[in-house]
Image (cartoon, grey):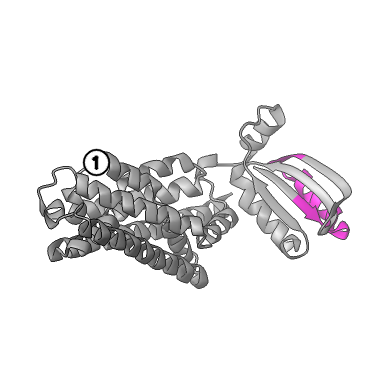
């Protein structure tokens, strides 16, 4: 990973010396007096992923988090011999390394509660409601992919696993508020569609071979939620965000919310309870699996540091 540091001038010699002497760090560059806000020296370096957490801890202890600047970015390729030597110097595999500062930073960004989060979640729930009416598996998959809720679920797991109560509260509040808002909008639109004659109780209660699973949670719903939560957290901590698409398609959170809104519009009590249970099972299962995954990763990381 690439680090861009702004170092107070008085600390620059110690910081640069520590980076240059670490075999897991390479391409160290010093630009004296280049930083304006905050003022100081600009230091650039590349650090093998396995060593990033250790290097960041040293920088935090040096006061750069409070009096300087620290920025991380991924490197797509580093084919030079010195970069390969730094990788050899660091034990373990890059995918196994967890950069906890980045995990926390990402989690805090996910609970900001932007308007786009509510918009995407509402659109996803509306697509899911239409999928129920048309019994369309394709629309169910589309709704799953559009839904942005896993970011908040992952943030909730991070907050619980790392003991960040404020982060946990914000993530839980965003999940509750987001789904309540999306379901409310979908419910109003479903009521309007029913008044216009577009939706009938039979549209929801009829046999739905492709989407009937949405409101029927079972033991496999729990298993899938646990596996998806584990895979989602691993994809984020390992920097493999492309794997999240599979997680989105696996879990039945957004489809359950769409079914819930539609079932309330036509008032089918058994499906209201079933879709609500499906939603809670998936959210709870993903959160629990995410917390356990993070705790295991943290324990493995501590053991690696003790043995290295």
Q: Give the residues in magenta.
A: 5-27
Observer-nearest residue: 179 or 206? 206
Image quarter for residue 259? bottom left
Residue at the image position 38 percent from the left and 65 percent from the top? 181
- In the picture, measured across the screen, residue 85 lies left or right of residue 236, that is right
Observer-nearest residue: 91 or 198? 198
Rendered location of residue 246, percent (x, y): 37, 41
Tell me if residue 109 comes above or below residue 22 in the rendering. Answer: below
* Residue neighbourhood size for the residue with mark 1, other residues' Cα within 10 Å, grouped as few (<14), some (14–19), many (≥20): some
Image quarter for residue 142? top left
- Would residue 266 be counted in the magenta stretch? no
Residue at the image position 33 percent from the left and 54 percent from the top? 125
Residue at the image position 55 percent from the left and 40 percent from the top? 94
Rendered location of residue 109, percent (x, y): 55, 58
Secondary structure at numbered mark 1: helix
Residue at the image position 46 percent from the left and 53 percent from the top? 297
Tell me if residue 72 comes above or below residue 8 in the rendering. Answer: above
Rendered location of residue 241, percent (x, y): 48, 43
Which residue is identified by label 1?
Answer: 137
* Res. 201 visible in picture: yes
- In the picture, measured across the screen, residue 263 lies left or right of residue 283, that is left
- Would residue 12 be counted in the magenta stretch? yes
Q: Which quarter of the image is occupied by the N terminus?
A: top right
């Amino acid at each position: 990973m690439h680090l861009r540091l702004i170092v107070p001038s008085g600390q620059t010699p110690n910081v640069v010396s520590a980076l240059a002497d670490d075999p897991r760090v390479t391409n160290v560059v010093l630009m004296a007096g280049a930083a304006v806000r905050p003022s100081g020296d600009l230091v650039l370096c590349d650090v093998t992923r396995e060593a990033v957490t250790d290097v960041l801890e040293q920088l935090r202890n040096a006061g750069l988090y409070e009096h300087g600047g620290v920025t991380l970015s991924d490197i797509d390729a580093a084919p030079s011999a010195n970069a390969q030597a730094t990788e050899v110097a660091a034990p373990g595999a890059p995918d196994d390394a967890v950069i906890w500062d980045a995990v926390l930073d990402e989690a805090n960004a996910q609970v900001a509660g932007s308007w786009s989060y509510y918009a995407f979640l509402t659109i996803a729930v509306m697509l899911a409601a239409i999928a129920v009416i048309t019994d369309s598996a394709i629309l169910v998959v589309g709704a799953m992919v559009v839904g942005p809720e896993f970011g908040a679920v992952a943030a909730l797991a991070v907050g619980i696993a790392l003991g960040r109560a404020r982060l946990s509260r914000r993530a839980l509040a965003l999940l509750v508020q987001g789904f309540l808002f999306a379901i409310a909008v979908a419910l109003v639109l479903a009521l309007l569609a029913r008044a216009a004659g577009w939706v009938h109780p039979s549209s929801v209660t009829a046999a739905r071979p492709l989407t009937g699973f949405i409101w029927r949670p079972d033991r496999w719903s729990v298993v899938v939620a646990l596996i998806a939560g584990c895979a989602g957290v691993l994809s984020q901590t390992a920097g493999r965000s492309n794997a999240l698409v599979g997680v989105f398609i696996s879990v039945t959170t957004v489809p359950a919310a769409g079914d819930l809104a539609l079932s309330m519009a036509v008032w089918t009590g058994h499906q209201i309870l079933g879709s609500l249970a499906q939603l809670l099972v998936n959210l709870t299962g993903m959160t629990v699996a995410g917390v356990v995954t993070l705790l295991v990763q943290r324990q493995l990381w501590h053991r690696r540091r003790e043995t290295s």
